[in-house]
Image (spheres, grey):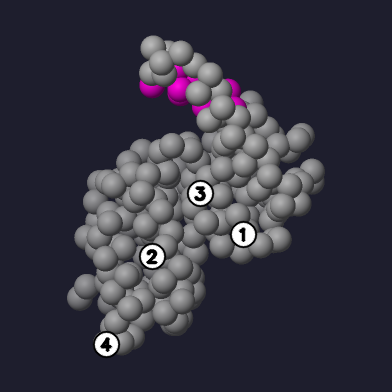
Amino acid sequence: MTAQLHFADAGEAGDLAAFLARLIHYDKAAAVRLQAAGDTLAVFGRPPSFEVLAIRTARLAKPYEHGIESSLDVTVSAGELLEFVGESAQSVESAGVALVPQAVTGPPWAGVLPPRGGWQPEQGLPPADAVRRLVAAAVAEFKSRVEELPQERRVRAELDQLGREIWSRTIGDTGLPVRAAHAAQALGFLRGDSLDLLSSGPWLRLRTNYGSIAVRRAGVGGLTVTPA
């Protein structure tokens, strides 16, 4: 029997489809890791331009079930999943049900996920509006400095170096790199006023009502992983 996801409503499927489409915009061959247990689906992706881990959850209408399996943990093609989820969001016949694509060989990041629990609130994160302004200022600075470069220096290595300089800056004293907020903005997470910063071991997590961005802090000891 083919594994299926029963979304709580078409809105849940539509929001997940939008997230997957944004991921594919940055990597047409993107893979995502799915973890479903109970009535919650978590989807993990890694947009290559940002070097962060993006997390989007969706509510399910009923606990995941597939034969005798009570949970789902699989890495699949983001493009194939988008096709199935998109059909679920738009079709009356599918009634919020999406097939789970066949598993693919996962990229290295898919085997190293943030921990499921143990998250503690961190202080010092500016309000959401201030974070959005910070991202906009960083984008403007990048564009301005690229325009200042002589044409012969506008090569990938030079642009990558400039990007690392700007996006590796931290937001205040939080240790959170600006690239995490930039990724949240690009993936549609940085909306509204809800914005929290959490930590667990070496991980920092920028959480909004629309999704989370996780990144490992530099200089913090051992890597915490979720068992594959």
Q: Mark 1–mark 3 contact, CB under 8 Å? A: no
- Name the amino acid, label 4: Glu
Residue 222 picture quarter: top right
- Name the amino acid, label 1: Arg
- 120 in relation to 15, above or below: above
Describe residue 228's horizontal placement relative to residue 140 as left or right.
left
- Provide the residue designation for mark 2: 17
Q: Nearer the viewer, residue 135 or 108?
A: 135
- Specify whether residue 161 is painted magenta: yes
Stretch of the chain drawn in magenta: 156-166
Percent from the top left, x then y, of residue 60?
45, 77
Question: Distance from label 4 to label 3 (Cα)?
Answer: 32 Å
**Crowdedness near tag 4: few (<14), some (14–19) or many (≥20) residues, C-alpha within 10 Å:** few
- Provide the residue designation for mark 4: 93
Tell me which numbered mark, 4 or 1, is placed earlier along the sequence: 4
Residue 174 picture quarter: top right
Percent from the top left, x then y, of residue 15?
46, 68
Question: Distance from label 3 to label 2 (Cα)?
Answer: 15 Å
Describe residue 47's horizontal placement relative to residue 133 as left or right.
left
- Provide the residue designation for mark 3: 186
- Provide the residue designation for mark 1: 191
Question: Distance from label 1 to label 3 (Cα)?
Answer: 11 Å
Tell me which numbered mark, 2 or 4, is placed earlier along the sequence: 2
Percent from the top left, x then y, of residue 31?
32, 50
> In percent of the image, x 25 and y 60: which residue is there?
80
What secondary structure prevails in the magenta region? helix
> In percent of the image, x 49 and y 60: which residue is there?
56
Q: Mark 1–mark 2 contact, CB under 8 Å? A: no
**Crowdedness near tag 3: few (<14), some (14–19) or many (≥20) residues, C-alpha within 10 Å:** some
**Crowdedness near tag 1: few (<14), some (14–19) or many (≥20) residues, C-alpha within 10 Å:** some
